[in-house]
Image (cartoon, rainbow, N blue to C red):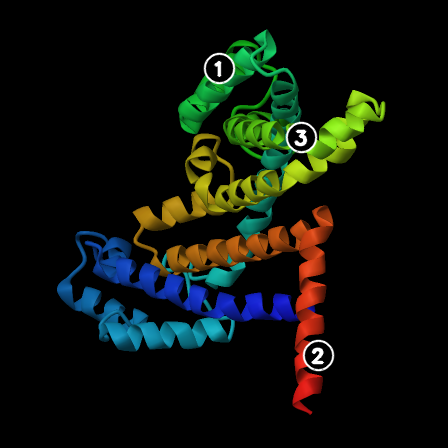
Amino acid sequence: MSRYILKRIFHMIPVMFGVSLIIFTLMFFIPGDPARQILGDKATEASISELRAELGLDKPFVVQYVNYIEGVLTGDFGISYTTKQPVSAELFARFPTTLLFAIISILVACIIGIPLGIISATRQYSFIDNISTTLTLLGMSIPSFWLGLMLMLLFSLHLGWFPATGFYGPKYWVLPSVTIGVTSAAFITRMTRSSMLEVIRQDYIRTARSKGQTEFKIITKHALKNAMIPVVTTIGLIFGASLGGQIITEQVFSIPGLGKLMIDAISQRNYPVVEGGVLLIAFSFTVINLLVDLIYAYIDPRIKSQFVIEKKKKESTALKGM
């Protein structure tokens, strides 16, 4: 298992380099001049050229990229053009809020999606299943920003139950987390239902029923555990995507997270913040994928046994070579 983890970590290196190259290239070739954006339209060409030289924007693309990578490898993501603060400090000041938002949202999605998917699978073609399928289609179709605005109008403006903006306490967490959680729950419900339907038709489920085990024990102990592999994959993908895909929701609810920081940075042509934010999101996504793969081994013993078998084969091969 440790060898597999090290292998995956080494695989993360070219991925991060690829992401850095893509985002740096996009930032380099998009229209707009950060120096002119900082100084304003009334700035002279001489002052703009002086600022471009100060920021290193007058150098060729390859030189700029090499300098940027050298800084990243030492933990230096550059200096923000607007605040003159280190980009790493700004990112890590905002990232905990985005991470908390993603965790609460995925918990809401799992609490709604997994039980609903199990009920739909065990009551296939029933009234509950039809209602669940309809709600799932609605959840997958409704844009998150529209749902957030509707929740804001109802629960903040009309009822006054929850604050409309911010993320400073449990009351502030409800509306944005439900906004992301409901749309994510639709995907989890669909995957749980399809996976459970496949499992409950297996022979060992019929054998468990013939032995007189209760339906609750059959579903929770036998069926659900074997059906969780694709569900865990879906949860991991949603959680990873929510770290970078909730930018619009953070903007709607004015949440001081990573997404809002990047939106503001894009409008200000603050390239170091955008590039650093994308790298941080990409790194988080790869780490989440690694954790999901490790969770597989604890859910399904057959996956863990594969690592043991491969290790024994390599050890036997090494002994034969001696």
Q: Quadrant of the C terminus?
A: bottom right
Q: From the viewer's perspective, is the residue at label 2 or at label 3 nearer?
A: 2
| Local crowd size for mark 1, using a 10 Å CA cut-off: few (<14), some (14–19), many (≥20) | few
Q: Position of residue 141 (x, y in %)?
A: 40, 23
**Circle 1 residue:** 134
Q: CA distance from mark 3 to mark 1?
A: 30 Å
Q: Kindly identify the amino acid type of the residue bearing the numbered disc 2.
A: Ser
**Circle 3 residue:** 170
- Residue 168 visible: no
**Circle 2 residue:** 316
Q: Residue furthest left?
A: 45
Q: Position of residue 287 (x, y in %)?
A: 57, 57
Secondary structure beneath dot 3 equals: helix
Q: From the viewer's perspective, is the residue at label 3 or at label 1 nearer?
A: 1
The quarter of the picture where residue 221 lies is top right
Q: Kindly identify the amino acid type of the residue bearing the numbered disc 3.
A: Pro
